Amino acid sequence: MAVSECIIFDGKSYSTKIDNETARLSGKFYSIRGRKPRLAIIDPSQTSENSMYGRSKIKKGEKLSIDCYYIRVPQPVNGKSPLEYIERMLIETEPDGIIIERPLPKWMSERDASQIVPEYLDVEGINLRNMGKNMTGEKTIIPATADACLQIIESLDGKYGKDVCIVNRTRVVGRPLAMALINRDYTVTVCHSSTTDLKEKTSSADIVVTATGKPEYFTSEYISPGAAVIDVGITKTDRGVVGDVNFRDVYNKAGFITPVPGGVGPVTTSMIMKNFMTIAMKRLEDRLNY
């Protein structure tokens, strides 16, 4: 495709549509329960980066009439279990949904995280039962970043093809996204740090999803002409925030590209709130129909 034909995805505009639906669900919840829905945001690492992401969620929650409780979890001392502390805080807040900020600290494993969050409060699809449902093709919640990528890919409606290469294999991006796409009849290749001939694999795909954290690593050589490129990476540099993709270079070759910032990020935050309201309403309706 020619340069002028490359479409730059507008994450802010797309996320607004998601927020409108979330606000509708939030209003419905309030009309039934007489209070705002409550989202517990658990931060086990307390890094400045996590605090920034937490604040953005709280700000988004305020706009959507969702009460967000930011729970900082202290590092375990003298063998004390941080899980007991989290459990106590959750009893106090009585949330309608729970998310755990990442990256996780060394003392908390992904398995720990999956056990903290019960299935019915799982906003990010990290509970083992929800992960299993995604694996078997049942309707379920998946992690918000993977869900954001899924929404963007689905919005393309097959225009760029259905062969997808994902450069990530984590539980919160690559794996759940791959399963969700396979369930929708996409052909998926998953690459990672041990993949050989990465350039060959990405350049033969119709859609490339990158989540490596390597700033501007992917140049036009990694992309096929007219391909759709979804950049999940986000890295702070002296020149500002950049993604995994060398935007200027790849833009000249791609047919569709998500910018950083302003691409996948806003959609991810909106999907967190949308998925939260989805499970909160389901739980409320299940109670009403009991």
Image: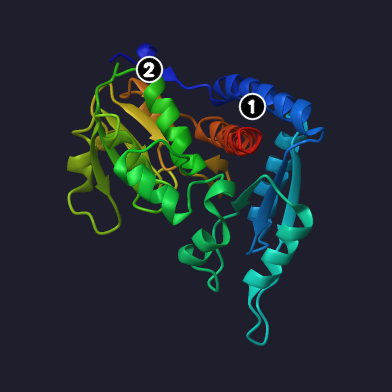
Of all residues, the one furthest to the front in this rendering is 290
Residue at the spot of label 1: 22
Query: From this viewpoint, is residue 73 visible?
Result: no
Q: Position of residue 193 (x, y in %)?
A: 30, 57
Residue 246's quadrant in the figure?
top left
* Quarter of the figure that contains the N terminus: top left
Where disc 2 sits, the SS reads: loop
Decide if residue 208 is on the left or right side of residue 64: left
- In the rendered structure, find residue 133 and report the number of the disc placed on it: none
Mark 1, mark 2: which one is toward the viewer?
1
* Disc 1 residue type (three-letter): Thr
Q: Is residue 53 left or right of residue 129?
A: right
Q: How many neighbours does mark 2 have within 10 angstroms: few (below 14), some (14-19), or many (20 or more)?
A: some
Return the residue nearer the eye: 277 or 4. Answer: 277
Instruction: Give SS at disc 1.
Output: helix
Query: At which x and y percent is residue 15?
Result: 58, 25
- Residue 286 left/right relative to 258: right
- Residue 176, percent from left and from top: 38, 45
Q: Are marks 1 and 2 in contact (CB under 8 Å)?
A: no
State whether residue 146 appears in this view: yes
Q: Amino acid at mark 2?
A: Cys
Q: Residue at x 81, y 35 (%)?
A: 35
Q: How many marks?
A: 2
Q: Earlier in the sequence, mark 1 or mark 2?
A: 2
Q: CA distance from mark 1 to mark 2?
A: 30 Å
- Write down the quadrant of residue 201 in the picture: top left
The residue furthest bottom is 78
Q: Is residue 138 above or below residue 132?
A: above
Mark 2 = which residue? Answer: 6
